[in-house]
Amino acid sequence: MPDPQRTTRSAAIDFVLELGRALHIQGASSPEIEYSMTLAARKLALAGEFFATPTSIFASFLAESESSASASTTHLLRVAGGTDLAKRARGRDPARRARKAPRC
């Protein structure tokens, strides 16, 4: 029978990884991806460190009962296609116009 705590931890890690992948595909910046993954991990009681590049995400999760590096698990997610810079530009354009708009 699987350990329920391990299953819950695995599901939480899978959620954080899929969140990072989804944000990456949608064109989020590396700092946005890393910050969002960090917040999600904290909410799920996971200790994690994250690093996003234009083509991949590295995620390391520290084991619950251990504090050594050898007790952590590290994942590499390759994200096909990289960041869609045109999509990012379209998404930021309304925010730029709003900041430049004259005040009432």
Image (tube, rainbow, N blue to C red):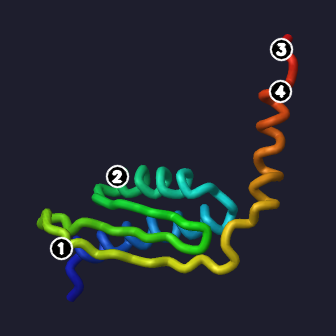
Rendered view: 99 above or below 79: above
According to the picture, the residue beneath numbered tag 4 turns out to be 100
Ranked by sequence position, the earlier of labels 4 and 2 is: 2
Left or right side of 42 for 92:
right
Ranked by sequence position, the earlier of labels 1 and 4 is: 1
Q: Position of residue 34 (x, y in %)?
A: 48, 56
3D distance between C-alphas at marks 1 and 3: 54 Å
Crowd rating for badge 4 (residues with CA inside 10 Å; few <14, some 14–19, many 20+): few
According to the picture, the residue beneath numbered tag 3 turns out to be 103
Ranked by sequence position, the earlier of labels 2 and 1 is: 2
Q: Which mark is residue 97?
A: none
**Residue at (60%, 74%) from the top-left corner?**
55
Q: Position of residue 2 (x, y in %)?
A: 23, 85
According to the picture, the residue beneath numbered tag 2 turns out to be 42
Q: Which mark is residue 71?
A: 1
Crowd rating for badge 2 (residues with CA inside 10 Å; few <14, some 14–19, many 20+): few
3D distance between C-alphas at marks 1 and 4: 50 Å
Circle 2/circle 3 CB separation < 8 Å:
no
Q: Amino acid at mark 2?
A: Arg
Q: Nearer the viewer, residue 40 or 31?
A: 31
Circle 2/circle 1 CB separation < 8 Å:
no
3D distance between C-alphas at marks 2 and 1: 18 Å
**Residue at (86%, 24%) from the top-left corner?**
101
Circle 4/circle 2 CB separation < 8 Å:
no
| Foreground tag (3 vs 4) | 4
| Foreground tag (2 vs 3) | 3
| Foreground tag (4 vs 2) | 4
3D distance between C-alphas at marks 3 and 4: 9 Å
Q: Position of residue 104 (x, y in %)?
A: 85, 11
